[in-house]
Image (cartoon, helix red, strand yellow):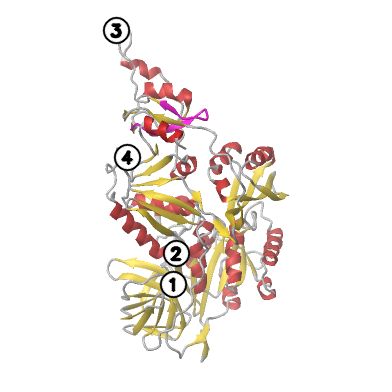
Amino acid sequence: MSYKRENVRNIAIIAHVDHGKTTLVDAMLRQSNTFRANEKVEERVMDSNDLERERGITILSKNTSIHYKGYRINIVDTPGHADFGGEVERVLMMVDSVLLVVDSNEGAMPQTKFVLKKALEAGLSPMVVVNKIDKKDARPEEVIDEVFDLFVELGATDEQCDFPIIYASARDGYAGDDPSDEMVDMIPLLEKIIEYVKPPEGDIAGPFQMLITTLDHNNFVGKIAIGKITRGIAKRNQAIAVIDIDGNIKKTTISNLYLYDGLKRVDTDEAAIGDIVAISGIGDVHIGDTVTDANAPEALPFVHIDEPTLSMNFMVNDSPFAGQDGKFITSRHLRDRLMKELETNVSLRVTELTPDTFEVSGRGELHLSILIETMRREGYEVQVSKPRVINKEIDGVLMEPMEFLTIDVPEEFMGTVMEKLGPRKAEMVNMTSAVNGYTRLEFVIPARGLIGFRNEFMTDTRGNGIMNHVFQGYDKVKGEMPGRSRGSLVVFETGDAITYGLYNAQERGTLFIEAGTPVYAGMVCGECSRAEDIDVNVCKKKQLTNTRSSGADDALKLVPVKKMTLENYLEFAAEDEIVEVTPLNIRLRKKYLDHTQRKRAARNK
């Protein structure tokens, strides 16, 4: 029996990075009276993870719900970065429509294209929100034209192209149907969601059925499975069957059943078709498993998740400083943590190469670096190799992953950027004059051509350029590409870096470390000004005599060091180098710490 839940709406918010998704959810939560009048609420309240707050990006999909005029609007906030596309792909199965948020100045960007493509493929009818209309350089009409062209380019149906439009300023908390009208609150957006988003529909009298699309964990109740009920009714203490991806069936019972109310999960005795619910007490389950009625077990298909394009080796830390910072340092700790990550990170792949080395494959550099940073903060020590792309053989031809690269750059730096992208096998596909003296350049480039490019790009454009890229597909391998043009400054002996030693070393290149930093032989302490590696003795002290005092070092002036982040090290690392990551330090080192071994390995190449 087909049944419509007229008082429920399920919607996901999708957008390019920093176009205001999470701020929009903030405004909707505030104006639907989700919070108490005196409740202190942080900005970007949905970005609950420390890393999300620091970087200003959404990494994990999250659920919330608001009540408005007797309607329950379930909202899923999704990541904007294509590296976390696995999060977007699976949560789109929980919703009936998407809210596409576009910046009123920047318009449709690469990640906008990526997330919209996924939504259209899922058959969802989007609504478009032109955000940040309070900007002085806003161009809402042109942006709508760009978005419409993008819909047509992606093969949207006539129904999908006839999208409703709302203009908004999420930061200031207002929305309306016309950018020239006076706007006071977000009510027009809520009204439009209720009017245009289809209510969930299905067989309410049939046996209960739900696909697990997200997992959470609670120390008291264990694993919590989250998904949308696609058929029937779920009740607390109901007998259920869990069907895994291989078709194995396990019988169990629903211990607790939760609905979303604002940012909280609230206990409920029953939930019906269309509700996004959380279930605890069903033991060891995985994303993609189906929860069904125990008497009529029937599996639901899971969405196809795009394959990883980049891989790195994760290794047990064996440097001379191993074990000084971390709590978890053995191969067993490393293996258990990576296997735990696989449960929730659906676009990740882990292969055990040796007992101490694991090949971890993901959707991009950011995807993997966020995992490394998370592990580091949890107390793990790990060594990782330089990222490398994953090639595929299609119809007997070796193919490599390609990226669609968009660059916004002031006209004066265009020549330099295009010159640098030439050897990286980039092909320009479009060039348009953007506003404010910026030009937009669009390229198709091999994914390996982007490794190490961001640092160079920021230097060449003096921090004025903006680059974004998204996975385009596979194409024939483009041939050899030049590697890093400069060598490394390698520490000669173990000890503490001394001002005198650093003063002599800085003439050879750019330093990454300051005086007083503990170092070991074979560690990389800077970038050499020449193409080859040079050994430097940063621990060297000035010999004291009657005419030389130790205080003379105070007169030595050191050039400010280049501060390196985890991403900087991953981009900078050469083939024979490893990034050592601990809770307190990030270091770059040579694979072979001994100088003689390095020479021998270089000869045997």
Quadrant position of residue 176: bottom right
Which percent across, then down, holds residue 78?
50, 63
Element under disc 4: loop
**Label 3 sits on residue:** 546
Q: Which of these two is toward me, 393 or 448?
A: 393
Marks 4/2: CA–CA distance: 32 Å
Residue lying at 33% horizontally and 43% vertically, measured from the top left: 584
Asked if one can make out residue 50 in the rendered structure from this viewpoint, the answer is yes
Comparing marks 3 and 1, which lies closer to the viewer? 1
In the image, the segment drawn in magenta is 519-535
Drawn side of residue 36 relative to residue 407, left or right:
left
**Label 2 sits on residue:** 346
**Label 1 sits on residue:** 288
Disc number placed over residue 319 in the picture, else none: 4
Instruction: Tell me which amino acid carries mark 3.
Output: Asn
Drawn side of residue 26 relative to residue 197, left or right:
left
Element under disc 3: loop
Comparing marks 4 and 3, which lies closer to the viewer? 4
10 Å crowding of disc 2: few (<14), some (14-19), many (20+): many
